Image (tube, rainbow, N blue to C red):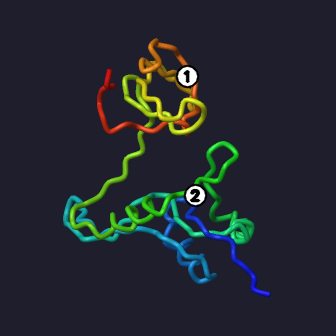
């Protein structure tokens, strides 16, 4: 009888500062498929310039895991833990992993910016009963909750959504 392996998906590990390469190497040596994107960048000190290899995503290691390996990763908890949104483990799409890998191939310096939503931004709801609707953030209340005005519903109803339910839109203004 043939055994089927569970499909693997890419996840994000949060690691201690400045240990991304070390943890990635340890996981790779233990059979995990990992991605720790690095890039050579020119850094300047007061007396010299030097080309150094920089980890693009501080404190993150990307790893492909199936359901069996997710349990196995727990034994490395002193050096890393899976990133979660609410109760769900964060999962990356293949397109996101491909983009992450390609970032390290760029000749120009890459900087990663972590931004929270700001009032006035246009966002699209990506899950729940209002999925596909667009609106403006009118207020932030706490870290993970926000209010949106949704004029496409014919009114400016305020709704509260968790941060993982919305994503930024490419457009700067709503189509009215």
Q: Residue at x 45, y 58 (%)?
A: 58
Q: Is residue 86 above or below residue 27?
A: above
Q: Position of residue 12 (x, y in %)?
A: 56, 59
Residue at the outermost bottom position: 1
Q: Is residue 43 left or right of residue 117?
A: left
Q: Where, quadrant-wise, is the N terminus in this rendering? A: bottom right
Measured as percent of width and height from the top left, residue 152 is found at 42, 21
Mark 1 highlights which residue?
141
* Foreground of the two, 50 or 117: 117
Which quadrant holds residue 68?
A: bottom right
Q: Is residue 47 left or right of residue 96?
A: left
Figure check: 165 above or below 42: above
- Disc 1/disc 2 C-alpha distance (Å): 26 Å
- Labels 1 and 2: the sequence-earlier one: 2
Q: Between 49 and 35, which is closer to the camera in this rendering?
A: 35
Relative vertical location of residue 22 with respect to residue 85 in this rendering, above or below:
below
Marks 1, 2: nearer the viewer? 1
Q: Quadrant of the C terminus?
A: top left
How many numbered discs sit on the rendered protein? Answer: 2
Residue 82 placement (x, y as % from top left): 63, 58
| Residue on which the image places disc 2 | 14
């Amino acid at each position: 009888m043939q055994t089927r392996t569970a499909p693997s998906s890419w996840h994000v590990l949060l690691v201690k500062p400045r240990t991304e390469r070390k943890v990635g190497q340890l996981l790779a040596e233990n059979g995990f498929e990992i991605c720790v994107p690095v890039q050579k960048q020119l850094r300047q000190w007061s007396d010299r310039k030097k080309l150094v290899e920089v980890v693009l995503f501080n404190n993150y290691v990307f790893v492909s895991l199936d359901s069996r390996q997710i349990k196995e990763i727990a034994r490395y908890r002193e050096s890393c833990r899976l990133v979660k949104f609410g109760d769900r483990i964060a999962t990356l799409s293949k397109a996101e992993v491909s983009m992450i890998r390609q970032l390290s191939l760029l000749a120009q310096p890459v900087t990663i910016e972590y931004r929270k939503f700001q009032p006035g931004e246009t966002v699209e709801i990506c899950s729940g009963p209002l999925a596909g609707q667009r609106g403006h953030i009118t207020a932030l209340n706490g870290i993970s909750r926000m209010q949106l005005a949704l004029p496409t519903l014919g009114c400016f109803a305020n709704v509260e959504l968790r941060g993982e339910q919305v994503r930024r839109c490419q457009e700067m203004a709503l189509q009215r």
